[in-house]
Amino acid sequence: MKKSILNLGKALNKVQQTQINGGKKQCDNHYQCGSGNCCNTAGWCQTFGANTGYLCDGGII
């Protein structure tokens, strides 16, 4: 049974993973998001000032 569970699908590459996540990059802090972006309260990178419904904690880098 373990073998059949492990063979449920194939491993996804980075491009496929990004498509499933909607292109969002997870983050823990602003430095992981790059210049002009912030790590919002949901833990995703967003452009500073974007109207996503989530807040950017702190300043931009």
Image (tube, grey):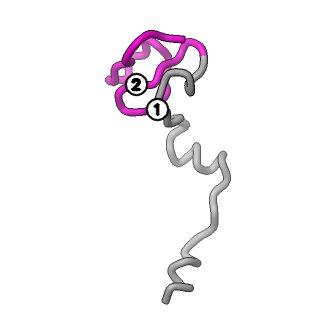
Drawn side of residue 60 relative to residue 57, left or right: right
- Residue 23 lies, in percent from the top left, at 55, 37
Q: Main secondary structure of the magenta part?
A: loop
Residue 57 in magenta stretch: yes
Which residue: 65% across, 47% down? 14
Where 20 falls versus 27 (above or below)?
below
Where 7 falls versus 20 (above or below)?
below
Q: Are marks 1 and 2 in contact (CB under 8 Å)?
A: no
Q: Amino acid at mark 2?
A: Asn
Q: Earlier in the sequence, mark 1 or mark 2?
A: 1
Mark whose residue sits in front, 1 or 2: 1
Q: What residue did someone put label 2 on?
A: 40
- Residue 28 lies, in percent from the top left, at 46, 32
The quarter holding residue 12 reads bottom right
- Magenta-drawn segment: 35-61
Where 35 falls versus 45 (above or below)?
above
Which residue: 48% across, 19% down? 38
Q: Quadrant of the C terminus?
A: top right
- Residue 3 lies, in percent from the top left, at 56, 85
Residue 25 in magenta stretch: no
Along the line of sight, which residue is nearer the eye, 34 or 24? 34
Q: What residue did someone put label 1 on?
A: 28
